[in-house]
């Protein structure tokens, strides 16, 4: 573990916004194993149960709203982070239809607040803004989106993530331009876009895997809304390894890694929703499902979305470790262990992932 990422994170002060969320809690766990000094700024865990509380992490945790600039300023001033991973967000497409104003405030103004705190905090050397594959203008074509494709977004969530990318790019151009690195500033900025991530510990509303697992735990059938929608599926540790590798390069002062990056699964790991459910049934026999009638009204959701990760493969040297079927297996077994015996196997999953990577 200590040799990962050239040991760059040992004793580093790392601030994670959104550390109580699904991806944030996994990232906090990994960084603590890497020997980092981790602080988190986030709302309280959004669900009960939740992965963050189950892990019993030791990070310096502040509960606060990313829109509260004064409270955020206090954390930056006190902790003096060297690198910031910005994950705090309103992360749900369907919720964004109900609360569009909140979604834009959290995802856009929240990014502005974090970027501005980094601008005025001398200790900060690197920023990684985590957005989403939904930031692209999705034309539902069969090939993957590249980092230089236009931002867009049909729904409020997707549009807010496109806006977050534009905010990051504006701050990079205006205050942290790579060509001025080491002359007028000492901060490198990147953004990371990942596809659908799955893994143990997610209980978010209106997400496929949490819906499957909640229903299985109750002995009920999960209702599948869009069984034939195609998504990129990857275990949560896959993009996190990309974020950490990207952070390493920025901390090393390699300005060529400033910019936007896609972290998605391989071309063979884009599957229909129904394939996910049926594969998870192989590892937990309590999983059962039914398909929502076409007559029921549903908000618009994309049917096809792919990422082209050639840039990360070639320039960053990153590539996926577990294919989607391994991700389905690891995820289903995590929840089966939790509901059958309240066993939390996240550290085991992390060790297994690192072994597979080696």
Image: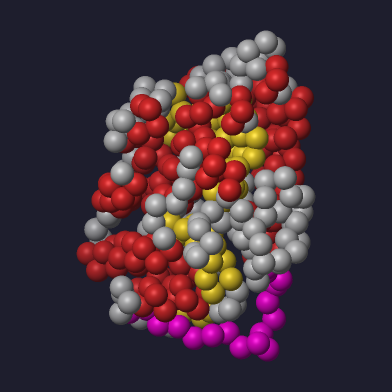
The residue under the point 30% across, 65% down is: 333
Q: Residue at x 36, y 41 (%)?
A: 29
Taking depth in this image into account, of 237 and 295 the one nearest to the observer is 237
Q: Is residue 290 magenta?
A: yes
Q: In the image, is 127 to the left or to the right of 31?
A: right
Residue 209 in view (yes/no): yes
Q: Is residue 354 above or below residue 246?
A: below
Out of 109 and 351, give the one closest to the viewer.
351
Quarter in which the C terminus is drawn: top left
Q: Is 100 displayed left or right of 313 in the figure?
A: right
Magenta range is 286-302
Q: Give x and y (percent) for residue 268.
A: 50, 65
| x 64%, y 58%: residue | 144
**Residue 87 at x, y percent in the picture:** 55, 42
Q: Position of residue 332 (x, y in %)?
A: 35, 67
Residue 348 counted in the magenta span: no
Tell me how many marks there are: 0
> Would you identify the image quadrant in which residue 185 lies?
top right
Residue 67 in view, yes or no: no
Which colour style is shown? secondary structure
Q: Residue at coordinates 46% horizontally, 67% vertically from top-left?
A: 209
* Position of 274 relative to 61 (above/below): below
Q: Position of residue 298 (x, y in %)?
A: 68, 77
Position of 97 relative to 81 (above/below): below
The N terminus lies in quadrant: top left
């Amino acid at each position: 573990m200590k040799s990962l990422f050239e040991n760059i994170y040992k004793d580093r002060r790392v601030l994670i916004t959104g550390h109580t969320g699904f991806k944030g809690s996994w990232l906090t766990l990994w960084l603590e194993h890497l020997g980092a000094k981790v602080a988190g700024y986030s709302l309280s865990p959004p669900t009960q149960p939740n992965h963050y509380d189950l892990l019993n992490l030791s990070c310096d945790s502040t509960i606060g709203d990313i829109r509260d600039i004064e409270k955020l300023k206090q954390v930056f001033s006190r902790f003096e982070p060297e690198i910031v991973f910005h994950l705090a967000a309103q992360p749900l497409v369907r919720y964004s239809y109900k609360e569009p104003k909140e979604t834009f405030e959290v995802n856009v103004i929240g990014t502005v607040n974090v970027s501005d705190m980094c601008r005025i905090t001398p200790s900060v050397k690197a920023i990684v803004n985590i957005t989403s594959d939904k930031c692209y203008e999705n034309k539902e074509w069969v090939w993957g989106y590249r980092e230089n494709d236009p931002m867009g977004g049909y729904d409020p969530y997707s549009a807010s993530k496109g806006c977050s990318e534009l905010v990051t790019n504006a701050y990079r151009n205006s205050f942290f331009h790579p060509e001025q690195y080491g002359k007028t500033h000492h901060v490198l900025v990147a953004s990371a876009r990942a596809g659908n991530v799955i893994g143990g510990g997610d209980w978010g509303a209106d997400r496929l895997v949490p819906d499957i697992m909640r229903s299985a735990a109750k002995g009920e059938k999960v209702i599948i809304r869009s069984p034939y929608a195609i998504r990129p599926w990857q275990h949560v540790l896959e993009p996190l390894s990309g974020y950490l590798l990207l952070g390493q390069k920025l901390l090393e002062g390699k300005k060529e890694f400033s910019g936007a990056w896609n972290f998605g699964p391989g071309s063979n790991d884009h599957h229909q929703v129904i394939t996910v459910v049926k594969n998870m049934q192989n590892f937990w026999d309590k999983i059962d499902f039914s398909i929502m009638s076409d007559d029921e009204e549903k908000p618009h959701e994309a049917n096809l979305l792919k990422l082209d990760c050639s840039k990360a493969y070639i320039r960053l040297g990153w590539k996926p470790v577990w294919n989607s079927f391994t991700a389905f297996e690891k995820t289903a077994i995590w929840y089966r262990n939790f509901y059958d015996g309240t066993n939390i196997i996240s550290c085991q999953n992390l060790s297994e992932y690192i072994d597979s990577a080696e």
